[in-house]
Image: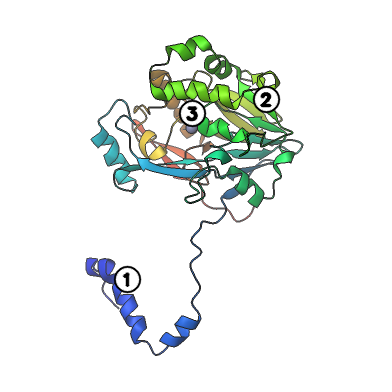
Amino acid sequence: MTDLSRRHLLAGAAAVGAASALSPLGALSVRAATPPTTSQAPGFYRYKVGTIEGTSINDGARTFPMPDKFVTNVSKDEALAAADAAYMPKGMVTVPFNPQLINTGNKLVLIDSGNGIANYEPTKGAVGRTLQNLAAAGVDPKNIDIVLMSHLHPDHTNGIRAADGSMAFPNAEIMVPAKDWAFWMSDENAAKAQSDMMKGYFANVKKVYAGIESKVTKYDWGKEVAPGITSVAAPGHTPGHTAFAVSSGGSTVMIQSDISNIPELFLRNPDWHVVFDVDADLAQQTRHKFYDMAAAEKATVVGFHFTFPSIGHIEKDGAKYRLIPSAWNPVL
Ligand SMILES: [Zn+2]
């Protein structure tokens, strides 16, 4: 048996290359060569909640240099160390995006809509993949009955528009949290915005909802907003930020939306504040309340910014939390 040493890890590729060049079967392996595909497989994953069928639809993931104040209340070095410990590329942070398609039996509900096809980057294809992954899952956007927003940040809401600006889900009722709508649509709040990020968010909501303002349905917390789907108060990330309980036949899955951003940083360090939080202290309180409940109840949790397929359980680890991703299930 060959011993396993660091030398093999570092030189493995070269050694394999040299061995095949010497092989008498070298000619055969040339004939059998298949060119690499160079693109990822479609990103959709199904799960059951009683008689309800959920599908995690991947909108993509964005890897970018970590901004100086990505975590506002610890040093950048500390935040980078956490990203490094999660094997993110050096100096970078990776944020995935995962809308959820919920087939209640008589309604097709899309919870959040992703970054939007207008933001699809053909060369990289990093984000804006919701429509193509819905198509891969066999779903016609015309058949979506409800698009249910957790909050009105661009990565959740911009996907309601097709590339030409028309409605991507032309027959869908669009439902938004009443408190988020009031906050982001207020000219007074927009005028108070300090950072370019916040100014951009206010402008984006106006732009995305221009011309359809009167058609949007506003919902409150603690209501069954669609069959089997209850809106759950989760304020802090934004004033109207909402989680959802999807329930059927005695089973429940919690859609946490953005109670935390990426778990590698913000479940491990629940008191860290991501730059996107509107009220970071309230978001921190909400996070502890939600994860203490999820851990105690052993609840299945779906996170918009968890790595695909974005489903798992929360384990309490002292004052911190850990995500235990669900195993791939080949049968429903
Ligand atoms: Zn988000």
How packed mark 1 is, by other alpha carbons closer than 10 Å (few <14, some 14-19, many 20 or more), is few
- Residue type for callout 1: Ala
For disc 3, the marked residue is: 293
First in residue order: circle 2 vs circle 3: 2
Indicate the position of residue 123 as horizontal and vertical percent values.
48, 51
SS of the residue under disc 3: helix
User: CA separation, marks 2 and 3?
Assistant: 22 Å
**Could you say which disc has been placed on residue 225 in the image?**
2
Residue 10 horizontal side relative to residue 229, left or right: left
Indicate the position of residue 306 as horizontal and vertical percent values.
47, 41
Residue 297 horizontal side relative to residue 55, left or right: left
Q: Is residue 276 something that shows in the picture?
A: yes
Q: Quadrant of the N terminus?
A: bottom left
Residue at 51% across / 56% down in the picture? 40
Residue 62 horizontal side relative to residue 128, left or right: left
- Which one is in front in this view, the residue at disc 2 or the one at disc 3? 2
For disc 1, the marked residue is: 13
User: CA separation, marks 1 and 2?
Assistant: 54 Å
Residues at circles 2 and 3 in contact by the CB criterion of under 8 Å: no
First in residue order: circle 1 vs circle 3: 1
Task: Count numbered badges in the picture.
Answer: 3
